[in-house]
Image (cartoon, rainbow, N blue to C red):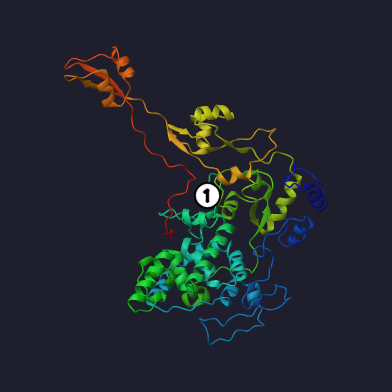
Amino acid sequence: MTLFPNGRLLAAAVLCLLSSACATLVEPPDQGADLPAVIDAVKLPLPSAASSPMAAASSPSGAASSPDGEGPVASAPVDPLRPEEPVDLESKVAQVDLWERLRRGFAMPDLDTQLVRSGEQWYSTRPDYVQRMTERGSRYLFHIVEEVQRRGMPTELALLPFIESAFNPQAISSAKASGMWQFMPATGKHFDLRQNVFRDDRRDVLASTRAALDYLSKLHGMFGDWHLALAAYNWGEGNVQRAIARNKRAGKPTDYLSLRMPNETAYYVPKLQAVKNLVARPGAYSITLPTLANHPYFLSVPIERDIDVAVAIKLAGISRDEFNTLNPQMNKPVILAAGTPQILLPYDNASLFVRNVAAHRGPFATWTAWVAPRTLKPSEAAQQVGMSEEELREVNKIPPRMLVKAGSTLLVPRAQHLLKDVSLHVADNATMALAPEALPPRRVTHRAVKGDTVASIAKRYRVSSSQVALWNKVTTSASFSTGQSVVVFVPQKQPTVRSKGKARKPVKRRTQSR
C-alpha cells in the first residue's frame, strides 16, 4: 500500500523517472540534478515560501530576486550599523548570500552599551563556540529568514535562537523550556504547540518558528517597540507591563534601557545586539562565518500514512542524526501521519524519498498506538498487546511498581494485517498516566488499653471491624483485655505521580539553556 492515497498517479510519474521499477533503494542524485523539476514531476506538495527553492523574500521594502538574476531586486534599508555606506540596490550579493540578506533586513534600532560590548567580547573570544552555533543554525536560518521577511519583521529576530538555545532545537532548560525558541509548556500550549506521548511541537522546526513569530508579533503589537517585545518574550509580558507602569508613576522613561529588570532580561537584548554586530562585521571581531547560500536547506515532504522513523530514514538515504536535527519533535520510533503530516528532509533527499516510497513494497509502520481500556499492570497490558512486559516497559518508559491508568496511550507492535492508521484524536491527545501499584499493608501490633474493642480499634486505624476480627480470630463484638496484643494491617500511603502529557499550571515562559 502506498504512503500517499493519491499514489497511483504519483507513483506512475515517479516510476517514469526511474530506469526500472524495483523495490531497491534509488541511489542519491548528483548534486547538480534538477531536483525541483523532479519534485514538480511527482506533484509532491512543496512547503510554504519558507522552503520553496529560491523563493522570493517578502519584506516591507519589496521582493528579493532569484539567484539567477530574474525578477526585481529587493530594496533594503540602509544598514544601521554602517549608515555611512550607501546600499547598492543593484548588487546581487544578497541574492546568493544568506548572511548578506540578513544584514540588509536589519531594521531594529541599535543599542550601544557596555553590556553590548561585553557580549561582543564574550563571543569574539570563543570562535569555536560561534562556529558550532552558526553551523547548527545553517540548517534552519533560511526558513526563519523567509518567515520573518514574509511577515515584514526585522531580520534581527532570525538571530534570536542564537541567544535562546545556540540554535539547538533539542535544548531543554532547567525551567523546562524546550526547543530552539525555548517555549515553556504552558506558553507552548497557548500557541498550539502539541506536547504529548508522540511529539513535542516546541521542538518542531516549522511549528515552533511559527509560534515564536506569532508571539513576538503579538508582543510588538502590545508594546509598539521591538526591544520591549523581546524583553517580554524573555521575562513575560505582565512583568514588562508592570515595570513600565512603575516608571510612569515615577515620571521616568519607559524604554528598554530605562526599565528595572532582572539581570537575564537586562542582558537579553544586548546579547542579541552583540550577535547582530558579529554578523554585520565578522572580520572586525576575527570571526569567520560559514558560507550560507540563500537557498533552502530542507524541503517539507507530506506523510499520509504512519511510518517508522527507521523506514523514513532508510528511504530518504540519510543518517539518523541528520533526521533528528530536522525532525527533533519526535518522541517515539513511529511517525503518526494524522498528527505529523509532514517531515523535513535535506533538499537533495526529498525527491529521493518520494521515489523510494513509490518503490517500497514492505510495511511502512511496525509500531502503532494502543489505548488502555482500564487501569492495568504492565504485565496485563503486555499480554493484551502481544509483547513482553520488559519490552513494553522499555519502549513506553514505565518505571517499576507502576500501573498504567485507563485512557493511557502506549506504543505497541502493529499487526501485519492492520490497515487502519492511528486517528487524529489519539495522535494529538495521547497521554501516559501512571499510578503506583498498591503497596502491601504494614503490620502494626497494638497494645490494648482498658475499654478497647474491635470497633474502637478499627475506627482508630481506619479499617473495618470485620478485618480486625479476622486478623485476631475474634468476633466483631469482642473486647480486648488491657495489655493484649492486637494485630492490625494498615494501608500504606501512595506517592503522588504526575501524568505525562497533562498541562501544568500556567507560568510565564522562562528561561533557557545557553
Residue name at image x 77 percent, y 58 percent: 38
Q: Residue furthest front?
A: 477
Residue name at image x 48 percent, y 43 percent: 500
Q: Tell me if mark 1 has few (under 14), some (14-19) or many (20+) residues whose alpha carbon lies within 10 angstroms of its own.
A: many
Rendered-image quadrant of the C terminus: bottom left
Eyeballing the image, is 361 above or below 91?
above
Q: How many marks?
A: 1
User: According to the image, label 1 marks what residue?
Assistant: 195
Q: Amino acid at mark 1?
A: Gln
Helix, strand or loop at mark 1? loop
Give 168 or 317, whichever is nearer the viewer: 168
Q: Position of residue 353 (x, y in %)?
A: 70, 51
Q: Position of residue 392 (x, y in %)?
A: 53, 33
Eyeballing the image, is 20 above or below 437?
below
Whether residue 388 can be seen here = no
Residue name at image x 50 percent, y 62 percent: 132
Q: Position of residue 382 (x, y in %)?
A: 54, 29
Residue 239 sits in quarter: bottom left
Residue 257 sits in quarter: bottom left
